[in-house]
Image: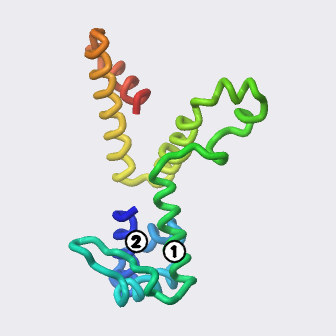
Amino acid sequence: AVITQDRILRSTVKVAKGTATPEEIAWLAENRIGYESAKEIGELASAKGDLQGSLWIANTDAWGKQDAVRTFRSSLRHVVDMTIITPDIGTRPISTSSHWLLRLMFQFRGFAFAATQKILISGLQRRDMATFNGAALMIALGALTYKIKSDIAGRPTSDKLGVWLMEGIDKS
């Protein structure tokens, strides 16, 4: 949340100064901060925010403009909710909670449904290098998990790239 707060504040300050890139403006809009709100938040952050080391801290209690505070906090919560994957009602198929037997069968699959919704689908819509890097890292860590678990269990690991890729995807 602190890193996200810093990114939001840096971007809004750039909007207020007129130096923001189109990508920063689009990222803010994607995360519930329109251009005019971004200018206002950037001005408030410049005047009343706190730069601690290299991180911006909002200090929203001193802002005095509740609409700007609400917009900033809403954006911050939205980005954090998208970053931390938690299964909720909107990420599971309705059919998995409509009958007791289906609830029992899918009770531990909520995280997989949420991950698919929040990571895979939103990442494919973004089509940027950060999404690709994140997916590659997740698969690499999944493959590392496959290797470590196999070593602990005393099982040999495959020498086929396809097996490593599938295990990496499965465990990511």
Amino acid identity at mark 1: Ile
Q: Position of residue 14 (x, y in %)?
A: 35, 81
| Residue sitting at x 30%, y 9% | 155
How many numbered markers are drawn?
Answer: 2
Amino acid identity at mark 2: Ile
Quadrant, the N terminus: bottom left
Q: Position of residue 49 (x, y in %)?
A: 35, 82
Q: Earlier in the sequence, mark 2 or mark 1?
A: 2
| Residue sitting at x 31%, y 74% | 56
Which residue is farthest top? 155
Secondary element type, mark 1:
loop
Looking at the picture, tell me which residue is in the foreground, 126 or 34.
Answer: 34
Q: Is residue 72 left or right of residue 47?
A: right
Which residue is farthest right? 99
Residue named by callout 1: 33
Looking at the picture, tell me which residue is in the foreground, 94 or 59.
Answer: 59
Q: CA distance from mark 2 to mark 1?
A: 9 Å
Image quarter of residue 12? bottom left
Image quarter of residue 43? bottom left
Crowd around label 2: few <14 · some 14–19 · many ≥20 (10 Å): many
